[in-house]
Image (cartoon, rainbow, N blue to C red):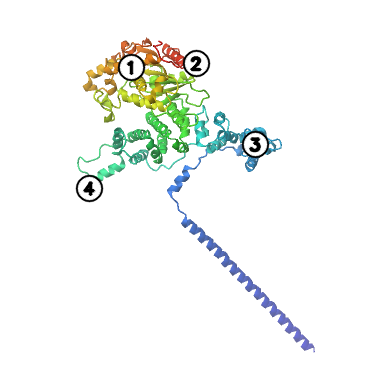
Amino acid sequence: MRTGAMFCCCSFRKICTQEQIRTGNQKKRSRKCIAVAGALLTGGCLYVTYEALSLRIGLTVHTNAVDSEKLKSYVYVYREPALPLARSGLTDLLKWHLQRLAHRLHEASAWLLQRPVEGEKCPCEPDLAEVLVPTSHRELNLSPWILLKRCMSGEATQRQKAILELSAIHNWDAAQYRSVAQACDPATTIILARCKDVDRRFFLPPPRQQRDTRLDESLQAVLLNLPTGDVDPCVSRLTSLVLSDSSQTRTRSEAAHWTFVGEILPGQRPSTPVSEDQVESICVKVILQHSKLPRRCEQLVHLGVLDLLLRLIEQDGVGPQLQHNALRVVGNLAMQPHLHSTIVQSGWVRVLVERLQSGRVIDEALAARALANMDRETVREHYPDGVYLLHPQQITTLNTTGDVLFVHGLLGAAFKTWRLRDPEASVHLSGGKYRDVSQCWPKSWLGEDCPENRVLSVEYDTRLSDWFLECPADSCNVSINVCCRRSLAYRSREMLAKLQVAGVGEKPIVWVTHSLGGLMVKQMLVDAASNPAACDVLANTRAVVFFGVPHSGSRLAELSLAVRFVLFPSAEIAELRRDSAMLQELHKRFTELVRRHGIKVLSFGETQPTTLGMLRTLIVSTESADPGVGEFETVPVDHLNVCKPEGRHSPIYQRTLELICTSLAPQQATPSGGPDQL
């Protein structure tokens, strides 16, 4: 019995041990299966993810066009931080976070956009900014958006008032100026740019463009894409001149003359290459002529002319004349309203503001013309090339009551003719047209003494000799071809059309002229008398000031004709022959208009000879400078300085100012005709 019991116990223990071993093996197998399945699942997921990312990268297309489009819309931020948090104390940091919180709460509730600007605040409306942020910090943070909303909405008068208020702010930080610059629409940006002493940070700088090619080659590429069949012969000649030296043309020329021995034939090598500066100068001249045609302006913009001109003026060592031509191109493009947005986006507005505040007379006038052509809210007129606004160049609350127009003479310019008197006067046959002027008295003095009048200055090309003629189409014999482009009749008709576009003739006018400019004004008034479309110019003419005008001719023409086979006198000189039948007929008709319309006349004549290189002569005699109507005075100076006063108290300026003020006085009635009042 005892042995059987022991056997049963051992058998039962063995059976229990085997069951435990079998159960442990099953758990091990289950763990191994789970581990293998988990590894397979994880690896599969990683493999699928890798393949998806690889497929996405493989299907991504990178093109230069996409990058260029991104660069156009990219806003470049200044490098300086808006708020140096690392150096700020705990109090400033807390205030900054409170301002951010208040600003986000205002944006979330759209409190600024849901109520009128001038409306009164309801007492039941809680203002979270008053609780979270002190008043001074809240106004500093929210004032840009309040002013910007007033500038971009509402009636025109309130809108302009808000823009003037915005332009007077100079104590914002850089972040606030950038925010306003990014949010402004083109019309608001343009009006803001014409405000006096506006901060330049209101305007975004030009975006940085990829510059893979040389500037001269890019300008030549623009000319290659412009048509030349329906343009001026001078433009075609200059285009062929500059393109004959382009890399594409040289390559075709060398390929055409390449022989089987691998050398260029003798006598067939390309001409001496033009320098890079000369290529850029000629290209800008051609582009300037194309920009005068409205049908070419949009094509020039599409070809990237705005960006190329920005590159040009940013270069070191660029001459002032080349920079002025670039500004003239922008002024011509600004006459097309559909291009204003493109000009603003290109960054040119900031450049124009910098030039308008530069203190240089020529840069200020060119920038003021371009901005005035883009401003279609406060300016109704357009200013074509050659018509420059001297006053007012910024937005003003005064309403102009009259126009004072300055017309220069032979070898003159819109700015240098009307500067202060030179200590020693000399004239050269070329150059010096765009040299900077120390002080332009019509801009500096009349703008202060007669602020209610608009002051304009016109410009046209003149020369003494055809030795320096750039275009053969400009050379002609006035006695044979009365339609010569540099004849007095042609220039007068062209200038009269430009002045009408600028709004001349809508208000009373006083003309201030020097030398050949006086003859042009006389011809314009005579043409206006027989042209119904321009009769307002004559009807609103109140007075004319003549400085050294050769009413009956000049001795300079006689000297030029005596040596005509050496000097080759220009068309302008040929028309100034003494006792010319054309000048006599012109003066007779002008005198009749003066007496019929009661036009006041004030004339000045020189008494000193003028130095012309090695020649010293009296250009306009006293008899020729006296028109026989109005008042006449002699000045002991030469021909060049007769229109340049020594100072503000000079008799020349005081007599001219008196005539302008009395002629353009608002209370003066329009003359009804009759005998000469002088």
Q: Is residue 315 above or below residue 6?
A: above
User: Which of the two discs, 1 and 3, labels the residue nearer the N terminus?
Assistant: 3
The nearer-to-camera label among 1 and 3 is: 1
Q: Name the residue under label 3.
A: 92
Secondary structure under badge 3? helix
C-alpha span from label 1 to label 4: 72 Å
Q: Mark 4 points at which residue?
A: 262
User: Which of the two discs, 4 and 3, labels the residue nearer the N terminus?
Assistant: 3
The answer to which of 155 and 13 lies nearer the viewer is: 155
Horizontal placement of 115 versus 660: left or right?
right
Q: Name the residue under label 1.
A: 589
C-alpha span from label 2 to label 1: 30 Å
Quadrant location of residue 232?
top left
The answer to which of 198 and 626 lies nearer the viewer is: 626
Quadrant location of residue 566?
top left
Amino acid type of disc 2?
Gln
Q: Name the residue under label 2.
A: 667
Res. 223 visible in picture: yes
C-alpha span from label 2 to label 4: 84 Å
C-alpha span from label 1 to label 3: 78 Å
C-alpha span from label 4 to label 3: 77 Å
Amino acid type of disc 3?
Asp
Q: Is residue 74 above or below residue 663?
A: below
